[in-house]
Image: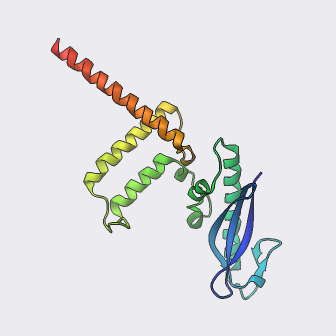
Amino acid sequence: MGSITVKLRKGIGTTQLIYLHFNYGRKKQYRYATGLSVKKSENWNADTNMVKNVNAEPDSNNINADLTKLIVASSDLLRELEQGDYPIDNILLKQRTKDFKNKGESTKESQYLTDHYKWFVKYYTKKPRPSTKKPRAKTTLKPYNNTLRIIEDYEKSLGIKLAFQHITLTFHTEFIQYLQDQNKEYKNRNERCLRKRSS
């Protein structure tokens, strides 16, 4: 069974950065930067994994509150992944912890492919993309929405909602086969319609 440990790492000057370590197997570990820090290592209580309530750390209560939320959310996430049927690795953990800094907890909808896809399209329809400094053009949205519809149809055929851990090489192979089968079905329907019209 995996575990979450809290460790400090040297930052600028005497500052110590607070990290969470996901221990999920023999010599398997993912290090997550919480974005929290302590001004000096002596202001840290290693027994409780909390910042000491001292004058030198005026924001200790807020830091400890945020850290507690992160530890709970991380423990819940690790337990959830261990109960699943998919192997845990650093890539998966990175995907699932990306919202921790902003919300202090895992975001349920972000783990699903189509929900994240919808957010991506909606966000970059209005916001400039880092690469072009411009929002996505309207002409780009049609193929994006068509792709979303196809993925949602595929989910209906499977009877599940695809999570990020489903996106593997096996998924790639099976999804390509699904598209090929759908294309054959679409061609067959067109041929039947043409035969009816010509008869």
Q: Residue at x 54, y 45 (%)?
A: 163
- Residue 126, by quadrant, is bottom left
Q: Is residue 15 left or right of residue 113?
A: right
**Does the image show residue 53?**
no
Can the viewer see residue 186 in this picture?
A: yes
Name the foreground residue: 22 vs 40: 22
Q: Quadrant of residue 136?
A: bottom left
Seen in the picture, residue 91 relative to 172 is either above or below; the reply is: below
Q: Position of residue 143 (x, y in %)?
A: 31, 46
Q: Nearer the viewer, residue 2 or 112?
A: 2
Residue 102 pos. (x, y %): 56, 66
Figure coloring:
rainbow
Above/below status of 141 relative to 97: above
In x, y percent, where is residue 186?
32, 27
**Residue in view at x 72 percent, y 85 percent:** 40
> Is 171 left, or right, of 180 in this rendering?
right
Q: Quadrant of the C terminus?
A: top left
Residue lying at the far right of the rendered structure: 47
| Residue at the (62%, 64%) spot, across then down | 104
Image vertical order of residue 155 relative to residue 145, above or below: above
From the viewer's perspective, tell me whether residue 100 is left or right of residue 154. right
Query: Residue 3 location, x and y as percent?
Result: 76, 58
Residue extending farthest to the left is 198
Could you say which quadrant of the image residue 96 lies in? Answer: bottom right
Q: Residue at 70% across / 79% down in the picture?
A: 60
In the figure, is residue 177 to the left or right of 64?
left
* Placement of 175 over or under 193, stated as above or below: below
In this rendering, the count of numbered labels is 0
